[in-house]
Image (cartoon, rainbow, N blue to C red):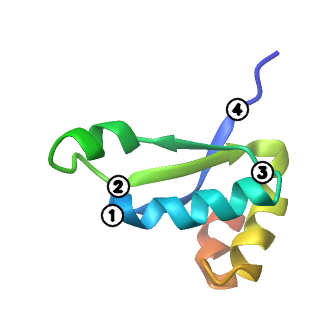
Amino acid sequence: MDEKFVTIKTFAFPADVTMVQSFMEMRGIETYMKNLVSNRLSYPIGDIEMQVKTSEFEIAKEALIEGGFALPEDFESINQK
């Protein structure tokens, strides 16, 4: 059974993605970058979404905070759902 992915962070520019994606991969967290290819090939269509498996959401959240790529309050609206 395939596991679902959930958006954990968004980026406005493709150049901002590389460092965070590499950091997550070094931590062993699988990421999927939704809209990345379309933003590299043309004018931005929308934000690039970093998605992680739902089972890895909490680990990914802590990694983003620890790495300085996010703040705890960035996740408040997600935690309230």
Q: Residue 19 placed where, x, y %?
A: 55, 66
- The residue wearing badge 3 is 29
Q: Quadrant of the N terminus?
A: top right
Front label number (2 vs 4): 2
Picture quarter containing residue 78? Answer: bottom right
Front label number (2 vs 3): 3
Q: Secondary structure at mark 2?
A: loop
The answer to whether marks 2 and 1 mark residues whose Cβ atoms lie closer than 8 Å is yes
| Between discs 4 and 1, the one toward the N terminus | 4
Picture quarter containing residue 4? Answer: top right
- The residue wearing badge 4 is 4
How far apart marks 4 and 3 lie (CA) works out to: 14 Å
How far apart marks 2 and 4 lie (CA) works out to: 20 Å
Q: Amino acid at mark 1?
A: Ala
| Between discs 2 and 1, the one toward the N terminus | 1
Picture quarter containing residue 21? Answer: bottom right
| Between discs 2 and 4, the one toward the N terminus | 4
Q: Residue 33 placed where, x, y %?
A: 51, 44
Q: Where residue 47 is drawn, which disc sits there?
A: 2
| Between discs 1 and 3, the one toward the N terminus | 1
In the image, is 59 to the left or to the right of 30?
right
How far apart marks 1 and 3 lie (CA) works out to: 22 Å
